[in-house]
Amino acid sequence: MEQRAESEYSQEASRLIVNGRRKREAARVLFHLAAKVPRHKLFRLRRPDLNRAMRRLLLVPLVYLCACHAADTTANSAFRVIAVLDGDTIRVAREGAVIPIRLIGIDAPESSKRDGKPGQPYSRAAKKHLAHLVLQKPVEWVSYGTDDYRRVLGVVHLGGVNVNLEMVRAGLAEAYRGRLQPGFDDSPYRQAEKEARQARRGMWAQGHQYVSPYEWRKTHP
C-alpha cells in the first residue's frame, strides 16, 4: 500500500510539472497525496525530470507541504505561536502541523550560536519583545513564499496589529537590507526604522556603535 502511494506521489509530481501547472497548484495536489506516504519516505522521493524548485518541494517533510498549501490564501488564521526562536523567527502550529515563519521585511539582532559565542547586542531583548507580543497567542499571517531555509516568509498579524512592523517601531529590528520577495512593500518598514533611529529606541541607543545584523553576519558566520 505504501509503495503504491509513493509511486502515485512521484508520478503525479512529474505529471504536474510536465503539464506546466503552477507550483502552488501542484502543492495542493501533492499535499493530499503526501498524507498517504510515510513522512520519512518523502525525503527519498526523486525523479530526474523534476526541476530544481519542485524537487526541493518534494524533499521537505509534510509540515512544509502544509505551509505551501496554506500559502494559497490571503491570510492564514487560527494558528498558535508555540515558539519564538529569535527576534524575527517564530513557529506556529495547528492540528499537528508545525510551520516556521520568518518575519519578512525585518532583520533583528543575531542571537548567539550553538558554539557558545555571544550574540549581537539587543538580540535577547528582541526575542523577549517578540515573545511578549505573540507567544502562545493565535495569529494570522500573509505569506510571500519561502526562504532558503524552508521557512514561510510572512507578515504576522495579531488582532489587526502588524507584528513585523511593531518590531521595527520598537527599535528591535531594522528594515531588511537584502532582496525582498516581489509584491512586498517595504516602505512602511523604512519609515518606521527612520523614526525609531531618530528616537534612539531599542538598539538604536547604541549610536555609532550600532552594527546592522546584515553586517554582523558577514563577520560572525
Image (cartoon, rainbow, N blue to C red):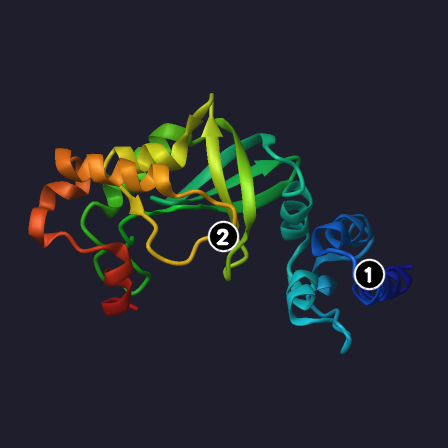
Q: Secondary structure at mark 1?
A: helix
Residue 142 sits above or below residue 5 on the image? above
Q: Nearer the viewer, residue 33 or 54?
A: 54
Q: Nearer the viewer, residue 30 or 212?
A: 212
Residue 93 shown left or right of residue 105 in the figure: right
Give the image quarter of residue 69: top right
Residue projecting furthest to the top? 159
Residue 163 shown left or right of residue 146 in the figure: left
Q: Residue at x 75, y 69 (%)?
A: 45
Number of callouts: 2
Marks 1 and 2 close (CB-CB < 8 Å): no
Q: Position of residue 71 (x, y in %)?
A: 63, 43
The earlier-in-sequence mark between 1 and 2 is 1
Q: Residues within 10 Å of mark 2 (few under 14, many from 20)?
A: some
- Viewer-nearest of labels 1 and 2? 2
Q: Position of residue 51 (x, y in %)?
A: 70, 71
Return the residue at label 2. Answer: 181
Q: Residues within 10 Å of mark 1 (few under 14, many from 20)?
A: some
Q: Quadrant of the N terminus?
A: bottom right
Q: Residue at x 9, y 53 (%)?
A: 209
Residue 75 shown left or right of residue 127 in the figure: right
Amino acid under label 2?
Gln
Q: Nearer the viewer, residue 200 or 1?
A: 200
Return the residue at label 1. Answer: 16
Q: Position of residue 120 (x, y in %)?
A: 21, 54
Q: Position of residue 6 (x, y in %)?
A: 84, 63
